[in-house]
Amino acid sequence: MARWKPISAVLVLVVLAASVYFFPRAMLSPGGVEPGHLGLAGDCFACHVPFRGAAAEKCIGCHAVADIGARTTKGVPLSPPHAKAGFHRGLLATDCVACHAGHRGPLLARDANQSFSHELLPAAARGQCATCHTAPASLVHRDAGSNCLSCHTETAWRPATFDHSRFFRLGGEHDAPCATCHTGADPKRYTCLGCHEHQSVKLQQKHARHGISDMEDCARCHRDTRHRDREKRRDRD
């Protein structure tokens, strides 16, 4: 079996070489240029440096950093100016290729898209997500505020984390699916009555002694399951 490994390796190299020779565009091309660069199609060295690839110095030869979002590469004022594009002026480094590819992606991997590198932002600008991003119009984000970093990171939108213990600690018997407490797919509303029947006279009297008449907003007082342990010890005593 071992003697076939060198032969297999040679065959793979032959197939690759033949593919590059007969189908150079499919094998080597990074895909068509972006619409704004159609005038440069075929002129690779307008953006690329030999043996280095795309280079930022080539980009700023046409795209002056101070003009991005305000003027075209021909110096024509944009109306209205794209205000959000002005953040380019405050980036820590002029590294265009860290975010922009210039091509629509390789023909064999169209989903190979680049994303913005938040490491280029000054420290004072990080965390001010609402400057560039608009929160999704979903129930989860409806009242979430502007502190995106409480659930999301600067590297990717997904996966996101949510610290449920800030509102109610999920543990023990309360380690349940969201729909158990949040009915109607609305995370801002919840009910405990699906599991706890707070209808008995005894429970109503117990809460009334503490001046509590609202039996719906349980989490206002009961933040986790530890109160049940305290009540059990109190009952035993």
Image (cartoon, grey):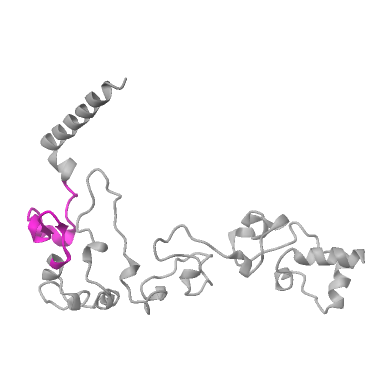
189 inside magenta stretch: no
Residue range in magenta is: 29-57
> Which residue is at 35% across, 73% downward?
132
Residue 70 versus residue 168 in the image, above or below: below
**Is 114 placed left or right of 42 in the picture?**
right
41 inside magenta stretch: yes
Q: For residue 78, what is the image quadrant?
A: bottom left
> Which residue is at 11% across, 36% downward?
21
> Which residue is at 23% across, 67% downward?
95
**Is 60 placed left or right of 175 in the picture?**
left
* Furthest-right residue in this view: 237
Residue 35 appears at what percent x and percent y? 17, 59
Q: For residue 228, what is the image quadrant?
A: bottom right
Q: Quadrant of the N terminus?
A: top left
Residue 32 appears at what percent x and percent y? 17, 51
Q: Quadrant of the C terminus?
A: bottom right
Please give the count of numbered marks on the rendered protein. 0
Q: For residue 41, what is the image quadrant?
A: bottom left
Residue 114 appears at what percent x and percent y? 29, 58
Visible residue check, residue 72: yes
**Is 64 placed left or right of 89 in the picture?**
left
Residue 88 versus residue 54 in the image, above or below: below
**Is 70 placed left or right of 172 in the picture?**
left
